[in-house]
Amino acid sequence: MFKHLLKVTLLTASVLAMTSCGVTQNKATHSSPVRSRAVNLDPIKADININEEEKLSGTSSSTYVIGFRVSGDQNYADGVNFSTMAFHLGRVRQVKSAAAYNAMLDKGYDVLVHPTYNIKVERGIFVQKYTATVEGYGGKYENFRTERQKIIYLDGGKELILQDRD
């Protein structure tokens, strides 16, 4: 009985080991979150100087075995926003952020403008590998300023400024 159970177990393990991996790819574009504020503040404005001559690109991969991350980048870009890839969102978000970090690494830019992500997910029985590649343009924030708040009243199509504060 034990030999029969051992043979069935070995046969099952062999079949599972020979199962092929599936691959899923996705492309996404940049999205911006909408934030509401409970406090009225004078907005800080800035110009973005975009270098359209050089396209930046970066890649990152992470490998998971039985749900545990065994390899991948350790550096991530903050403020990377995207709204796609509902499945395995945390893992995809992590490789996208790492790819953005790698694209801007040592370039001196503040923001990655119009990023385009290409996501590849390889799935096996015990192993999943997530790879993200991003391309976009580098931008620097310049000319920071506060714009004065105005209350404008429209009277028959004519603007009347009631208050202008510094």
Image (cartoon, rainbow, N blue to C red):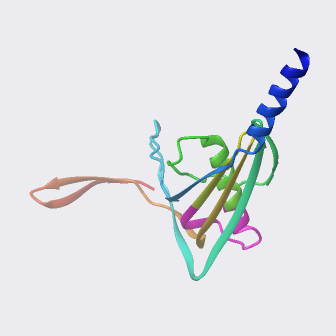
What residue sits 67% from the left and 44% below the top? 91
Q: Nearer the viewer, residue 76 or 84?
A: 84
Residue 103: horizontal and vertical position, in percent?
69, 68
Residue 50 appears left or right of 34: right
What residue sits 68% from the left and 49% below the top? 21
- As drawn, 95 above or below 4: below
What residue sits 77% from the left and 71% below the top? 106
Residue furthest bottom as drawn: 53
Find out whether residue 92 is within the magenta segment: no
Dividing the image into 4 quarters, which one contains the N terminus? top right
Find out whether residue 114 is within the magenta segment: yes
Q: Is residue 77 visible?
A: no
Residue 154: horizontal and vertical position, in percent?
17, 54
What residue sits 72% from the left and 59% below the top? 60
Residue 105 appears left or right of 121: right
Residue 137: horizontal and vertical position, in percent?
58, 73
Q: Nearer the viewer, residue 121 or 28?
A: 121
Instruction: Identify the magenta region.
Output: 100-117
- As drawn, 28 above or below 53: above
Dividing the image into 4 quarters, which one contains the C terminus? bottom left
- As drawn, 53 above or below 138: below
- As drawn, 29 above or below 21: below
Q: Nearer the viewer, residue 41 or 36?
A: 36
Q: Is residue 92 visible?
A: yes
Q: How many marks?
A: 0
Residue furthest right as drawn: 3
Picture quadrant where residue 157 is located: bottom left
Residue 83: horizontal and vertical position, in percent?
50, 48
Picture quadrant where residue 138 is located: bottom right
